[in-house]
Amino acid sequence: MLREVRDDDLAVMRRWRNHPRVRAASFTTHEIGEDEHARWWKATRADASTHVLMYHHEGSAAGVVSFHDVTPESARWGYYLDLDGLERATMLLPAWVGLERAAIAHAFGTLGVSELRGEVLADNEPVRRMHRRFGFVEVGTYERQVDGVPRDVVAIELRKEDA
C-alpha cells in the first residue's frame, strides 16, 4: 500500500534515509540534518510535479517512494526502505518486491505516466537485478559526481506497455 507522506512521517523518513547503507547507495551520501530535511520537505510540498509516498508492508510503514518531474509522458522515481526494521523482521526482500510492484502500479495507474525512469549506481548490482526482474531496461550509463567522487550511473526505463 502507498499513501501520501504526512508531516508526522518526516522523522522516521530521515532516520531511514540516513541509514549508512541507504546513504552509500544514494547520490547524496552525507547524513541529512533536521534543518536540511525540513527545507527539502517544504520545497517538495510546493512542487506539483513531485509526489512522495509512504510504503506500508503488512500493515507497517516500511519505505518511501518518490516520483519527480511527473508529466503524462514520464516520471523519475526513487525509493528507500527501513533496512533495520525489515531485516529484524526478516521481511526485507518481500517488502522490497512489494514496494517495487506498488510503485510501478502507482506510476502507470494513479499518475498515468507512459514511462518510468530511474538511475542506479553502476556498482549496486542487487538493485539493478531487482529492476531488471520487473522489466526495467538499462538504457545508458554516464559518470556523475557523488560527493566529489566520480561514479558510474546506469539509467533505467520501463514503458507502461512492458510492465
Image (cartoon, rainbow, N blue to C red):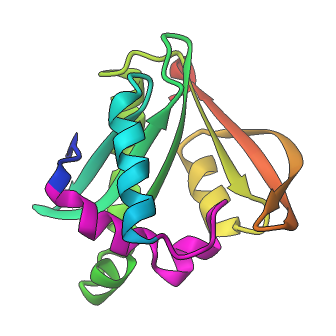
Percent position of residue 96, x then y: 40, 62
Q: What residue range appears in magenta?
A: 8-32
Q: Seen in the image, is 15 located left or right of residue 1?
A: right
Residue 82, can we see it? no
Q: How many marks?
A: 0
Tell me where residue 24 appears, x and y as whole percent.
Answer: 63, 75
Residue found at x 44% / y 71% = 33
Is residue 16 inside the magenta stretch?
yes
Furthest residue toward bottom: 88
Q: Residue at x 26, y 53 (%)?
A: 55
Name the residue at the left extreme. Answer: 59
Which quadrant of the figure has residue 157? top right
Q: Is residue 160 left or right of residue 143?
A: left
Residue 94 lies, in percent from the top left, at: 33, 66
Q: In the figure, is residue 8 to the left or right of 21?
A: left
Q: Residue at x 32, y 60 (%)?
A: 63
